Image: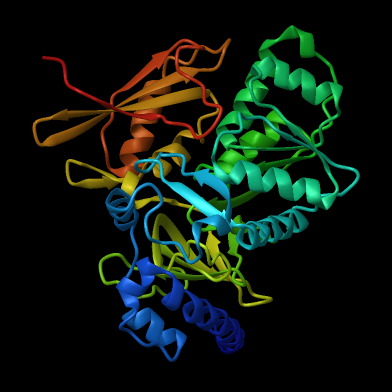
Amino acid sequence: MRHERIQQQRDLIRASQWDRLRAVLDTILITNPFHRKRIGHLSFDSLEEFTERCPLMTKRMIVADRESNPPYGTNQSYPLENYTRFCQTSGTTGPPLTWLDSRDDWNSMLAAWQLIYDHANLEPGEDRLFFPFSFGPFLGFWTAFEAASRLGCMVIPGGGMSSHARLQLMLDHKVTVIATTPTYALHLAEVRDAATTFDDLPFHLRLIIVAGEPGGSQPDLRRRLEAAWPGARIFDHHGLTETGPLSFQAPGPSPRLQVLEDIHFAEILDPATGQEVLEGGEGELVVTTLQRLGCPMLRYRTGDLVRKAYADDSGALCLDGGIIGRYDDMVCVRGVNVYPSAVDALLRQFPEIGEYQVREVRNGALLDLHLIVEIKPGLRVPDLPDRISTALRDALQIRMPVQCVTPGTLPRFEFKARRWIKESPAI
């Protein structure tokens, strides 16, 4: 019964998506040189034909196009004077790429963010949102900030400030919501606890909106955030500069992200076969933008590893457990494929760990991983390295030397954490 009902709901969603995609194709196959060259010779009469015939897009293709046609490439559906916003990717998974948006495209992303805020139960006129990071050209900062302002919330930027100053600002202005990475939310709590100036002072934080790193839907990480900020609810979402906002935390007991299917046509493909995985299967998230026409992405390989699920009430596509990891982050250690997100999820189960770093050391053709963990202040846990090593071996089938260091040894991160370091072996 559930399967039949979900299938009926999926048919309605896909019919609506095909109507939107057909309108996109009618425009860009006339005006967009990049896509006209790629698929102008193809015809599509249904969403099924589109997925069968349209080739996948990769970041490497975009980089090559930008290098051949600097600085913006040929993936432009409008004359240059129609573009009003400039953004740039963060560069964590390749060279930074500039991105241009028209006014209509920008407004569609703000509308997507307003949907995310609605699901997060933001309260216009009541909530005060703090953005504790420096505003560079990264798209997510600007769209989240502007969308909250349009909703009627007070928005407070926190660029160019120390963590201590940001905490003081949160107190002084009774901030109720922060938008940040999970790592930095934990770091703010760490700074607060280390500074006696904040002892017994009441923070008003009720909601932490996280993104930028896999893990916002990990139960252990969520519990750590909730313990660090008592009374604050954790709300996960994710997006890409190349696509805009993609998903939001779905309601329900198990952490999962629900795809914004009015805005994106999403597929979850088995990288080995290129075929759509079944519900419960894992694969790579592939996205086609349905509203962002100025620089559209058609079957774009995001690199995100996700698990396919459907919402029981609406049939909406969901990502069970959020973003599990990234295919381009995977390393092979003596025949075992290791995802950094899997290591992170395991280490989050050890409350004694304050921060960690993994060093990749290549010895000829072989890769070894060395783990450095920073113990929280005031703790003495001599058996911690052995317990971590055993957990890594049992769960991931890898052997990894573990070294413990004193608090404050390892770097902290304001934006996306970079804990995996490539290191040359000593000569």
Name the spot of residue 81 as percent of width and height, x first: 55, 56
The answer to which of 102 and 427 lies nearer the viewer is: 102
Q: How many numbered markers are drawn?
A: 0
Do we see residue 80 in this rendering?
yes
Q: Position of residue 200 (x, y in %)?
A: 83, 16
Measured as percent of width and height from the top left, residue 68 is found at 27, 52
Q: Is 78 in front, or is 369?
A: 78
What x and y, as percent, mark residue 37? Answer: 31, 72
Figure check: 154 above or below 23:
above
Residue 286, relative to residue 197: is it above or below? below
Residue 234 picture quarter: top right
- The quarter in which the N terminus is drawn is bottom right
Among the 4 quarters of the image, the one containing residue 247: bottom right
Say which quadrant the C terminus sits in. top left
Locate residue 36 relative to residue 137 in the image: left or right.
Answer: left
Q: Residue at x 19, y 23 (%)?
A: 424
